[in-house]
Image (cartoon, coloured by chain):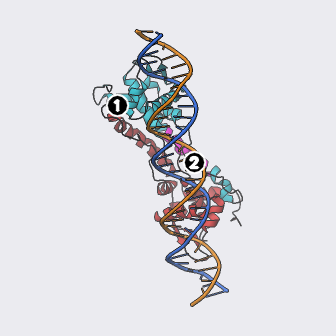
Chain colours: A cyan, B red, C blue, D orange
Amino acid sequence: MPTSTRFVVAVHTLAILAINEGRPVRSEDLAFSVNTNPTVIRSLLSGLADAGFTTAQLGAGGGALLAKKPSHIALLDVYRAVEDSELFSMHRSPPNSVCLVGRNIQNVLRPTLDKAQAALEAELAQVTVADIAADIAQRGDFRMPS
Amino acid sequence: MPTSTRFVVAVHTLAILAINEGRPVRSEDLAFSVNTNPTVIRSLLSGLADAGFTTAQLGAGGGALLAKKPSHIALLDVYRAVEDSELFSMHRSPPNSVCLVGRNIQNVLRPTLDKAQAALEAELAQVTVADIAADIAQRGDFRMPS
DNA sequence: ATGTGTGTCACCGACACAATTACAGTTATA
DNA sequence: TATAACTGTAATTGTGTCGGTGACACACAT
């Protein structure tokens, strides 16, 4: 199960933006903190901007900025913005409808899987980017890498 | 964040075994219902057998059998038996410790991610293979494919 | 006008999963 | 006991997704 790192990296990015309130941060600096390539960050920011969480200030001295107060961005919102695929994936090729089990397993399983996913999402809905940023800020003075 | 299809296929398989209580079911028949290759099923059954959920009757007329009452197999047990990796994956390469955010993001995020996963697992713990089998059986007479 | 930075595309390598083939080992049964 | 029917597992292949990388057009501050 190769789950993507996008969600964690997106929260990481938004936390930096929250702590740098108002100051644009370059994708290069974000990438330096995340330890990845600037293009990876920009592609991620593209999705976050579509969702209305960030904006970009183009040109020299520009960079990424929060478009909403961090206390109004729940981790669930971030999760949904950057993580597209289903949590549980069903059969790769559809089960055999000749068999009673094959014909019904997906419909029978669906409510349980949906409930499980909803429970997970309810937890993510209770934490905001502001919470994460505050937790981090509490651990020491912030300093952007060189 | 796609999970593998193993979990759903494992539940599918166990449901068939539950409905065929006592009669060994060949991997070929299970594969026919799931619409995959018998070896995929056998490899899955290997893990389920290690977890103590199934046994195999070797030789002619053999096949897979439940080793526990289906009411004693929660979907969470199945999930853990066949799905190995973490639900949320952290940064591929470790974040930059020069940055306060990079240094702390994983520790700060961990409790929230753990809580979310626990909530999901709590839901899966409440449903058993017997529940699924009953739901399916209720939808019509069972008949093994030719 | 120039330099700085974003947005996006295309491509590559790594990796996990599923499908498939092959074959050794076990067991019912004729 | 010989044979056929199964399982268990190893090895190989195909495929999809993700993350990393380079290239380049576009936007904007100065």
The amino acid sitting under disc 2 is: Ser
Image quadrant for the C terminus of chain B? Answer: bottom right
| First to last magenta residue range | A108-121
Q: Mark 1 — residue?
A: B101
Decide which of B122, D20 is in the foreground and name it: D20
Q: Which mark is residue B12?
A: none
Q: Is A46 on the left or on the right of A60, as rendered?
A: right
| Residue C27 x, y percent position in the rendering | 55, 80
Do the dots labelled 1 and 2 sit on one chain?
no
Q: Is A30 on the left or on the right of B120, as rendered?
A: left
Q: Mark 2 — residue?
A: A89
Majority SS type along the magenta span = helix
Decide which of B4, B16 is in the foreground and name it: B4
| Residue B95 x, y percent position in the rendering | 36, 36
Q: Is residue B67 magenta?
A: no
- Which residue is drawn at the image coordinates 56% and 41% (left, top)? A85
Q: Looking at the picture, does residue B11 appear above or below residue A89?
A: below
| Residue D24 x, y percent position in the rendering | 53, 25
Question: Residue under mark 1: which chain is it in?
Answer: B
- Which residue is drawn at the image coordinates 42% and 29% (left, top)? A13
The amino acid sitting under disc 1 is: Val
